[in-house]
Amino acid sequence: MRFAPRLRPLSRLAALSLLLAAGPVPAEESRFATQAIRCSAVFSVFIDANADDAALAAKFRKAQKIFEEVYAGERRDKSADAATEIATKRAALLKEFRDNFKEREPYLHEEGVLCGAWAEGFLAQGENWSFIPVIPKVIAQSARDEYSRIGPASFTRWAK
């Protein structure tokens, strides 16, 4: 008993042609890439909300740049097109943050803590980071205290 009909050679060629004509299928982003671009957006909020504090804004710009590099590296795309893609994705995330702020505010605050703790793992390496810390599952109390203070105040100022 046969369960599936066999394709004739011409049918196989037609099926292959249709598959190739459809173009490349975009790969799913890894959790790592997804979190890096989200952290880039979170730090964009921190930069905007703390523009009046030069030292803090500089630290946040550095963290945002690191997350962009991590995202591009994870996607294995460091071309000029990557910068455009990063800016587009970050803008979409910022729109999502703003559109859903009231319903998602506590989650955004916690994501700020997570991203802040992850950024501290990079920033602690100095100017030229050489290893990528894992996305934190355990957050140092000092990082939690700092970003639990910075995050809510930043998101509230930014969302107005």
Image (cartoon, helix red, strand yellow):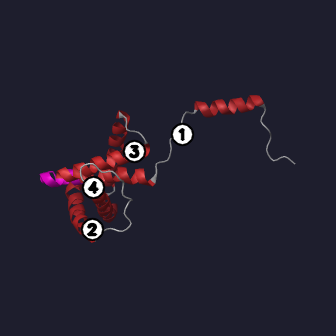
Q: Are marks 3 and 1 in contact (CB under 8 Å)?
A: no
Query: What residue is pinned by disc 1?
Result: 25
Circle 1 residues within 10 Å: few <14, some 14–19, many ≥20: few
Quadrant position of residue 121: bottom left
Q: Which mark is residue 125?
A: 4
- Left or right? Give the position of 149 relative to 117: left
Give the SS element for disc 4: loop
Q: Nearer the viewer, mark 4 or mark 1?
A: 4
Question: At 34% across and 56% down in the image, what residue appears?
Answer: 100
51 magenta-colored = yes
Mark 2–mark 4 Cα distance, whole angstroms, equals 19 Å
Q: Amino acid at mark 3?
A: Gly
Extreme residue in the right direction: 1
Q: Earlier in the sequence, mark 4 or mark 3?
A: 3
Give the SS element for disc 3: helix
Q: Amino acid at mark 4?
A: Gln
Circle 4 residues within 10 Å: few <14, some 14–19, many ≥20: few
Q: As displayed, is residue 20 above or below residue 66?
A: above
Quadrant position of residue 159: bottom left
Mark 1–mark 2 Cα distance, whole angstroms, equals 39 Å
Circle 2 residues within 10 Å: few <14, some 14–19, many ≥20: some
Question: At 38% across and 47% down in the image, what residue appears?
Answer: 71
Q: In the rendering, at what x and y percent does residue 79 appear? A: 37, 35
Mark 2–mark 3 Cα distance, whole angstroms, equals 27 Å
- Left or right? Give the position of 22 relative to 81: right
Residue 44 seen in render: no
Quadrant position of residue 9: top right
Mark 3–mark 1 Cα distance, whole angstroms, equals 20 Å
Q: Amino acid at mark 2?
A: Arg
Query: What residue is pinned by disc 2?
Result: 144
Q: Which mark is residue 73?
A: 3
Residue bounds of the magenta highlight: 46-56
